Amino acid sequence: MIFVDTGAWFAVATARLKNRYLEDHVMIETGEQLYQAIEQMGLQRILESYRNEILTKNARNFALLAEGPLEQLRQLQKQIDDYLQRVEAGGTPAST
């Protein structure tokens, strides 16, 4: 018999849906939003915490818990790169 931690499963499923929504609907348009996105990159600390607390005890749980923050970090990095490319091309002022 396989036991599933429904709380962890629900959290992962919710994070995936949220990430898909954010990926489709969020774009950095101002310097202030850029600054906020850079601050959100602090998610790396969460991953470090997961690694220190969970990885050595249960690698599978670590992989499940890290999946959402990793995807969010990838999306933030892409949004930052896209914004900076627009700024360099003269499409968006960096100081707003």
Image (cartoon, rainbow, N blue to C red):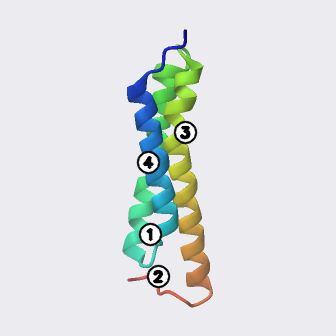
Q: Secondary structure at mark 4?
A: loop
Amino acid under disc 1 = Leu
Indicate which disc, 3 or 1, sits on the residue closer to the N terminus.
1
Q: Nearer the viewer, mark 3 or mark 2?
A: 3
Q: Please state the horizontal and vertical placement of residue 58, each as a whole percent of the image.
A: 54, 16
Given residues 13 and 37, the one toward you in this image is 13
Q: Secondary structure at mark 1?
A: helix
Name, please, the residue furthest toward the bottom: 90
The circle drawn on residue 67 is 3
Indicate which disc, 4 or 3, sits on the residue closer to the N terminus.
4
Residues packed near mark 2 inside 10 Å, few (<14), some (14 to 19) or many (20 plus):
some
Residue at the spot x=59%, y=20% of the render? 59
Q: CA distance from mark 1 to mark 2?
A: 9 Å
Residues packed near mark 1 inside 10 Å, few (<14), some (14 to 19) or many (20 plus):
many
Given residues 29 and 60, the one toward you in this image is 60
State yes or no: discs 1 and 4 in contact (Cβ < 8 Å). no
The circle drawn on residue 34 is 1
